[in-house]
Amino acid sequence: MNDNRTIALVAGVLALLTAATVVGQFLKRHPDRGLDPAAVRTFNNRLRGWWILCTVLAAAFWLGTTATVVLFGLVSFWALREFITLTPTRKGDHRALFWVFFLFTPLHYVLVGVNRYDVFSVFLPVYATLFVLARVAFAGDYKRFLERTAKIQAGLVVCVYCLSFAPALLQIPIDATSTAGRSGNFRLLFFLILLVQFADCMQYVWSRMLGQHLVAPAVSSNRTWEGLLGSATSTALLAAALWWAAPPFQLWQATIAGLVVALMGFAGGMTMSAIKRDRGVKDYGTLVVGHGGVLDRIDSMCFAAPVFYHITLLVTGVQPG
Amino acid sequence: MLSPADITEMQPPMRSGSGRSAFCRAAGLSLAALARLLSGASVRWIASQPDTCQRVYFANHTSHLDALVVWASLPQTIREVTRPVAAKDYWSRGLIRRWLAEEVFDAILIDRTDIKVHQSPVDMMLREAGTSHSLIVFPEGGRSVSGEVAEFKSGLYYLAKKRPDIELIPVHIDNLNRVLPRGEFLPVPLLSCISFGPPLWLERGEAKLDFLARARRAVLSLKE
């Protein structure tokens, strides 16, 4: 991974995080600047989260493709735990859930790891769906049958299937001729993660600054149309500025990818808010007290990853698998 | 009430802590870690603090995993002096279960089918607890089917009456019945929550039913 573009990207991210940390600590020590202390605290917490994210990603990237796929697999597993915990299930779903957790989820990630696009693209949406339907029927409890099976399916698709397209980016042969090989793929994946995080952040900032028109007040009290537009524009600009880091893209393709990632991320956040509202909770988990759950952190990623993956396929024109 | 002389007489043979082999202690540590990982238990102490003083933890009963997970939720130093009270018919079946119950978490097994007047479970628990061990009990007597917390059996009252010096800590177990429901043997790794509440004691002259109802409300109030 010792090529100039990777070094530039890593150096840029480190510089940005360091600068933000310095600013965050400065604001924390000088509460008299007229800034909302709660906002400063949120900012510093977020920043700590990004340091952890970057460290874990760097370690996984350094260890290679398999380690990265395993990392995403574990994240999926935990997110699915949170999703099903919040979803009311009945006893008749127990055995179907057992196989969903211990067979379908790991096996799907194995298929991603060995790059069998032909199998993993249908494994969960078709075969796991059929299995869940049949297994719940065999368990003999028909009460709210479609509702219950649909919930398990939705959890699998969002938390496992969609998220797995992120590590699957590592398997697309982008530059078969170049010797840089895999480093381009890792940059591409990092590009996606960066855009998703940035879009989340910009959505918050623009909503706070200009937000007037809520998209759906009953679902989310802080997601506005201004936030959506602002985040889409800023993310597209960032993508354009960083287009050199994402190997297969031309400038205009990177811009469009950034735009789409921001829109999908916003849609993901809205969707998870709707589910949380329905269940009457604020966050998905209590892994770290006060930090929400894993699912709260990856909701945008789950929606953006498959679209970004397919944009990459379109642009490179390669046949996956 | 018991006189101090009675209590010294009730000293059990040293079985826990230093008495156990290093292998069993290592097994205990890994079992506790595994139980917490699998049950995704987040542990809350609400207006309460972990302490090694002698206590009775009483919890709602929803799953076979309850005793194990409550035990695993305690800090290690407290775990060493805490013994779950469990049903003999379940925990003495099979070699692994019996080994776990007897050697690893040092459970006090109660024979639910053979309760005699002279050998009441409460006396046995107190004898086994001695002056240093804490207990984990499930006063509903069995796992609830509906998910509701059933009325408490009177054992907790007699425990409190015979040993008024022991702190009674209410514990609420949430969602563990979905991890391993009644009649299932394969767990689903959902997230559960174990809440420990503030201690309570038997008030002077408090009637049995009032006390049991108050204890049950203390568990329910941790549900939020």
Image: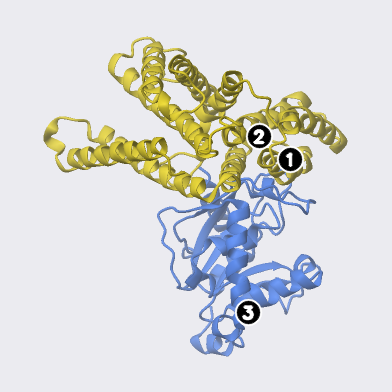
Q: For the residues marked 2 and 1, what is the alpha-carbon distance in whole angstroms?
A: 21 Å
Q: Residue at x 24, y 38 (%)?
A: A19
Q: Residue at x 38, y 21 (%)?
A: A203
**Residue position marked by numbered label 3 in the rendering:** B23
Q: Colour of chain B?
A: blue
Q: For the residues marked 3 and 2, what is the alpha-carbon distance in whole angstroms?
A: 40 Å
**Residue position marked by numbered label 1 in the rendering:** A104
Residue nearest the observer in this picture, A178 or B24: A178
**Is circle 1 on the same chain as circle 3?**
no
Circle 1 Cα neighbour tier, 10 Å, few/some/many (<14 / 14–19 / ≥20): many
Residue nearest the observer in this picture, A20 or A292: A20
Q: Looking at the picture, does residue B116 appear above or below residue A274?
A: below
| Residue B208 in sight in this render | no
**Is circle 2 on the same chain as circle 1?**
yes
Q: Nearer the viewer, mark 3 or mark 2?
A: 3
Q: Earlier in the sequence, mark 2 or mark 1?
A: 2
Q: Residue at x 55, y 47 (%)?
A: A64
